[in-house]
Amino acid sequence: MGMAKEIVIITEDTYGGEFFKRLLGRLNHEGLANIKLKKLSGRRNPIHAPYLCNHKLTKIIKAAESAFPEFILIVYDGDDPANYGSRKRDIAKHIPKKTEVPVKIFLFEYEIEEWICKSLGYSWSTKPSDELKKRERYTKSNLPKYADKLDFEKLKRNCKSFREFLEILGD
């Protein structure tokens, strides 16, 4: 592989930053991606984003842009495939009109825990995180360690959002 793409990730999950660091490390190691997190002055990368409908997201995007990454990836939960379009539009509203750096939006169909459930062979009735709480006594603070338990082969076969994520990283 050539030079690694340097990107900035903005994620709504408090523990998502460490999760994505570990995930990218594994994806790079297994040859599924060639991505580095761009160094940012005075701030962590991945960046924890506020909930939607908060104008801070626009400021965060502008600050990330000043580091000139290859692209900025905004990651939010979809909260249900039926909400996908409206969630994506809500996020897009926060992207400044004139950006020098491409900004890509990635939504999970439900939430980040869907990848964990699909890797472990769990189905869910309400939310993936609820299923993990029942079966694994899961708490959000456990999220980063689950990056090590993801089954990339299962996810590539059975998980649309994971395939989309890999596609975005490869673009």
Image (spheres, rainbow, N blue to C red):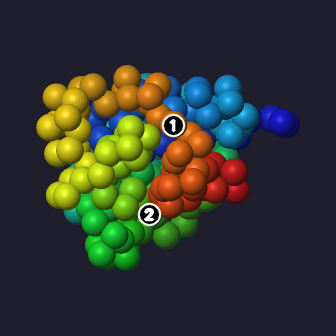
Question: Residue type at mark 1?
Answer: Asp
Cα distance in 3D space between marks 2 and 1: 33 Å
Question: Residue type at mark 2?
Answer: Ile
- Residue tagged 1: 151
Image quarter for residue 19?
top left
Q: Give the class, few, some or many, for how many residues have Cα within 10 Å of label 1's Cα (few <14, many ≥20).
A: some
Q: Nearer the viewer, residue 46 or 57?
A: 46
Q: Give the class, few, some or many, for how many residues have Cα within 10 Å of label 2's Cα (few <14, many ≥20).
A: some
Q: Residue at x 68, y 40 (%)?
A: 32
| Residue 49 vertical position relative to residue 44 in the rendered view, above or below | below
Rendering coords of residue 145 (x, y %): 37, 23
Image quarter for residue 33?
top right
Helix, strand or loop under label 2: loop
Q: Residue at x 48, y 42 (%)?
A: 9
Q: Earlier in the sequence, mark 2 or mark 1?
A: 2
| Relative horizontal placement of residue 111, taking residue 154 as reference (left or right) | left
Q: Quadrant of the N terminus?
A: top right
Whether residue 53 is visible to the viewer of this picture, yes or no, is yes
Rendering coords of residue 143 (x, y %): 32, 31
Q: Nearer the viewer, residue 120 or 49?
A: 120
| Residue 146 vertical position relative to residue 128 in the rendered view, above or below | above
Whether residue 38 is visible to the viewer of this picture, yes or no, is no
Helix, strand or loop under label 1: loop
In the rendering, which numbered label is found on residue 95? 2
